[in-house]
Image: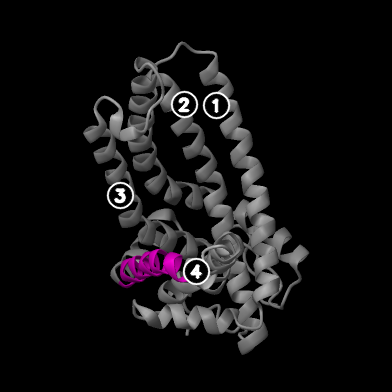
């Protein structure tokens, strides 16, 4: 294995296929080595989303307490503003997701290969792939929306309670490496990176599903714990908009911690899958920047 100057670069993990336990261990190790740029990149998405979510939730909480009973959102005072804020939150999230996730993937890939990268540099590299990534994200959203009626019909409506979650779970696992294909391999946006992800996951579905479940459980515990703390604090305060801001803050903090960790774990799984299926040797690929890997 190639050695690095530990004063300036991170020490890469073993370049070999790893079991689930090793992948989890390496995920935390890599995250610990590059947490600062990962956190800064995530904040680019978290801060605007948190501000918009805080405005939405605080207005919703205040409107609910000013009503005789909690009604559906269209009946609340200022419903147009609330709906507009919610739509703006969705649009901002969709617009920033390709840039932020691209930056997280590039940072994680550098760390896996024993390279240090600053948040600004990672975002500049991600910006070069922004439009293909955005097009792919929009196409994935379209697939998710179109999949619902297909899965409902496929389950003959009665069994939709089973076919919908199972179908979506399979879709998310098989498309897990879509943005990695766009950002790290240079695939054009659209169907090409989605097909590439399906090919990589084929034959590795169950191990990747297991890894995803473990990460989801860990992040759910962290997110739920932070959210519960914020709810407890908010419950001790008099009814008002501050309650909504506290809930948005709890969501934002948990997202800033769990999103980068998930990106690191997924990037390690991506390289592990390529080593198993394609014989990718990261040590031989370490000289070019990760964004230009074949």
Q: What residue would you read off at disc 1?
A: 230
* Quarter placement of the N terminus: bottom right
* Label 3 Cα neighbours within 10 Å, binned few <14 / some 14-19 / many ≥20: some
Type of secondary structure dominating the magenta stretch: helix
Give coordinates of residue 167: x percent, y percent. 55, 68
Indicate the secondary structure of the residue bearing disc 3.
helix
Q: Tell me which label, 2 or 1, sits earlier in the chain.
A: 1
Indicate the secondary structure of the residue bearing disc 2.
helix
User: Do tag 2 and tag 1 residues touch (Cβ < 8 Å)?
Assistant: yes
Give coordinates of residue 93: x percent, y percent. 35, 51
- In the image, is residue 3 above or below residue 55? below
Residue displayed at 68% across by 76% down: 15
Residue displayed at 33% across by 37% down: 52
How far apart, in angstroms, are the residues tagged by discs 4 and 2? 37 Å
Residue displayed at 67% across by 59% down: 213
Give coordinates of residue 171: x percent, y percent. 52, 70
Q: What residue would you read off at disc 4?
A: 151
Between residue 97 and residue 56, name the one nearer to us: 56
Indicate the secondary structure of the residue bearing disc 1.
helix
Q: Tell me which label, 4 or 3, sits earlier in the chain.
A: 3
Q: Tell me which label, 1 or 3, sits earlier in the chain.
A: 3
Residue displayed at 34% across by 33% down: 73
Q: Tell me which label, 2 or 3, sits earlier in the chain.
A: 3
Residue reaching furthest to the bottom? 278
Q: What residue would you read off at disc 2?
A: 246
Q: What residue would you read off at disc 3?
A: 92
């Amino acid at each position: 294995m190639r050695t690095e100057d530990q004063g300036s670069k991170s020490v890469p993990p073993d370049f070999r296929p790893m079991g689930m336990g090793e992948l989890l261990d390496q995920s935390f190790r890599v995250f610990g080595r590059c947490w600062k740029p990962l956190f800064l990149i995530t904040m680019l998405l978290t801060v605007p989303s948190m501000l918009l979510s805080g405005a939405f939730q605080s207005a919703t909480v205040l409107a609910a307490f000013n009503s005789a009973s909690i009604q559906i959102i269209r009946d609340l005072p200022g419903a147009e503003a609330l709906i507009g804020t919610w739509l703006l939150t969705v649009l901002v999230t969709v617009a920033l997701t390709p840039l932020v996730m691209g930056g997280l993937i590039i940072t994680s890939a550098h760390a896996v290969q024993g390279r240090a990268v600053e948040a600004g540099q990672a975002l500049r590299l991600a910006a070069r792939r922004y439009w293909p990534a955005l097009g792919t994200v929009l196409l994935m959203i379209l697939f998710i929306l179109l999949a619902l009626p297909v899965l409902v019909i496929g389950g003959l409506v009665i069994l939709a309670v089973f076919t919908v979650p199972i179908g979506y779970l399979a879709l998310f696992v098989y498309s897990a490496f879509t943005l990695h294909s766009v950002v790290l391999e240079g695939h054009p946006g659209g169907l090409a990176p989605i097909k590439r992800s399906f090919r990589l996951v084929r034959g590795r579905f169950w191990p990747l599903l297991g890894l995803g479940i473990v990460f989801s459980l860990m992040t759910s515990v962290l997110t739920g714990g932070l959210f519960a703390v914020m709810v407890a604090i908010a419950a001790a305060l008099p009814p008002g908009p501050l309650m909504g801001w506290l809930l948005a803050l709890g969501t934002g903090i948990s997202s800033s911690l769990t999103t980068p960790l998930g990106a690191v774990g997924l990037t390690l799984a991506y390289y592990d899958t390529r080593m198993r299926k394609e014989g990718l040797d990261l040590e031989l690929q370490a000289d070019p920047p990760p964004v230009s890997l074949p």
